[in-house]
Amino acid sequence: MEETKLFLITYLAAFIGVVPPGLVNMTVAKTCVEKGKRNGFYVAIGAGIVILIQAFIAVLLAKYIFDNPIVRRILLRAGLVIFCILAVYFFIQARHKKGINHNKQKANANSVFKGMLIAALNVFPIPYFVAIAGTMNLSGGMEYDWSLNIAFTLAACAGSFTALYIYVVLFDKIEKKAESFAKYSNYFMAGLMLILIGVALVRIFNS
């Protein structure tokens, strides 16, 4: 019963966290437009694998992170560097974008690895899942067994993957405006990175 409650709450929280446009879901949408829906689905699978690992790490380290402000600052600084690199990358990509290449490639392992790489670069889920774990009291206080940790991890992965899959399903609507989407998506991603840089700086100074 406790596992079911934890699973449902974590699933909903993870789903809501991924629904807004972000690094991973926008990559899934871009892949659908440029390489076809199946490749976009494979990117979502690759991202889901990494999110599963991130959620597991988060639930195990929740108490340690909450009790060590130095660790929080290190994570924030690492995220800041990654966001800066990604902002420059997407801006360069946007400047060199010349229309859209509808390259409907056969889905393969490369798309899975692409999803894993993008999800690994996106460090935000770890502190997000840590915060959820803390809210669900998985960071301390009560002595939970492994079943709750596993339920939390699976729910976080399932909720995130569901949101990513919605982006794949809605690909048909995105494809109708593929030209404009391809033109502005990289600029959007660069802008998103700038926002995350600002958030990271505020959190670093406040900590």
Image (cartoon, rainbow, N blue to C red):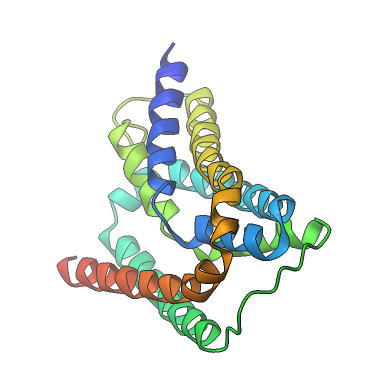
Q: Residue at x 31, y 39 (%)?
A: 134
Depth check: give the residue in front, 65 or 86. Answer: 86
Q: Is residue 201 above or below residue 21?
A: below
Lateral position of residue 49 relative to residue 163, left or right: right
Residue 206 x/y as whole percent: 15, 67
Q: How far from the left and from the top, in percent, is residue 154?
A: 55, 33
Residue furthest left in the image: 206
| Identity of the residue drawn at 30% across and 70% down | 195
In the picture, the quarter occupied by the N terminus is: top left
Compared with residue 161, is residue 23 higher up or lower down, i.e. above or below?
below
Is 145 placed above or below 194 here? Answer: above
Q: Position of residue 125 (x, y in %)?
A: 43, 52
The quarter holding residue 28 reads bottom right
Give whichever of 145, 47 is nearer the camera. Answer: 47
The residue positioned 41% from the left and 58% from the top of the image is 124
Residue 25 percent location from the top left of the image: 51, 55
Depth check, front residue: 123 or 13: 13
